[in-house]
Image (cartoon, rainbow, N blue to C red):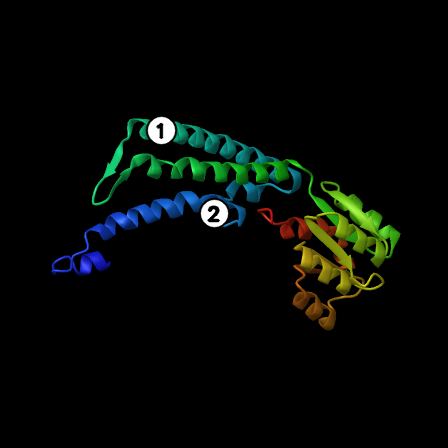
Amino acid sequence: CASVFVRRTPYAIGWAVEASEYILVMATFLSTGWVLRNGGHINVDVIPNALTGRSKDIYEGILYSIVTVLCLVFTIVGLSTAWEAYVTGTLQVKVYSFPKWFLIMLIPLGGFFLSVESSKIARKRFSKRAVLVVDDEEDVLETIKALLSDYRTDVALDFQTAAAKLKERAYDAVVLDIMGVRGFDLLRMCMEKGFPTIMLTAHAMNPEALKESMQGGAVSFVPKEKMEEIGVYVDVSLPRLPP
């Protein structure tokens, strides 16, 4: 903008457009892996939205596996091209002149980081997601475990067992009873670990419990009379990209 504004003045800065181009190239190739890790890419969700549970994970696992292979191809071809430019001493000549391999190296660097993040996502999609369910009623645990058959489900009947599991393992989601297991204390532990957490209660939507759950960082609040829908709540709460 500055270049256009002062173009017809004695203070023209013709190099600004070229500098901006190089900055855009660097920002694009060096940030793509980081953006993918943080879930910042635009997604076309027509097919994923039509799938549920394990089928959605398998579809995305295949998709990210393909992305991994393509990014590795970009990395190898980019390295080969950059090496050729280095050996021949080819220059990038515009307002600025510098070795062309330096600019080309941005492509394999970006491709490498993107392939690493894509492979991580593919691996997690192919693995069964882990869910921890905490409740002081054994029959409730068995029911929820059966409802979450698409997941690798751990259970705990009390606060101590649940706290130990949260310290030892990583979970994609946690379902917590409020009463009898110190649910809000466990919720704080889940937030420290970054685990999406669903609060389960035997009572209807108690305003105080709902408020404390939401303020504590819970993603959902589910009365036990709607327990048969727990799979939907867990599926929605699962992060699309790993922490």
Q: Which residue is drawn at 41% across and 30% down?
A: 79
Whole-percent x and y of residue 140?
Answer: 84, 52
* Left or right: 191 in relation to 86: right
Residue receiving disc 2: 41
Nearer to the camera, 78 or 191 = 78
* Left or right: 165 in relation to 68: right
Q: Residue at x 76, y 54 (%)?
A: 227
Q: Going from the N terminus, do you reach mark 2 or mark 1 first?
A: 2
Quarter of the image for residue 185 reads bottom right
Distance Cα–Cα, label 2 vs label 1: 27 Å
The amino acid at mark 2 is His
Whole-percent x and y of residue 236?
Answer: 63, 51
- Most extreme residue toward the bottom is 208
* Left or right: 11 in relation to 59: left
Q: Nearer the viewer, mark 2 or mark 1?
A: 1
Residue receiving disc 1: 81
The answer to whether residue 68 shows anywhere in this view is: yes
**SS class of the residue under badge 1?**
helix
Disc 2 residue crowd, few under 14, some 14–19, many 20+, Cα 10 Å: few
Q: Quadrant of the N terminus?
A: bottom left
Q: Which residue is drawn at 33% across and 49% down?
A: 23
Q: Is residue 232 positioned above or below 178 on the image?
A: above
Disc 1 residue crowd, few under 14, some 14–19, many 20+, Cα 10 Å: some
The amino acid at mark 1 is Thr
Nearer to the camera, 104 or 223 = 104
Whole-percent x and y of residue 105?
Answer: 38, 36
The answer to whether residue 222 shows anywhere in this view is: no
Q: Residue at x 83, y 58 (%)?
A: 159
Nearer to the camera, 194 or 109 = 109
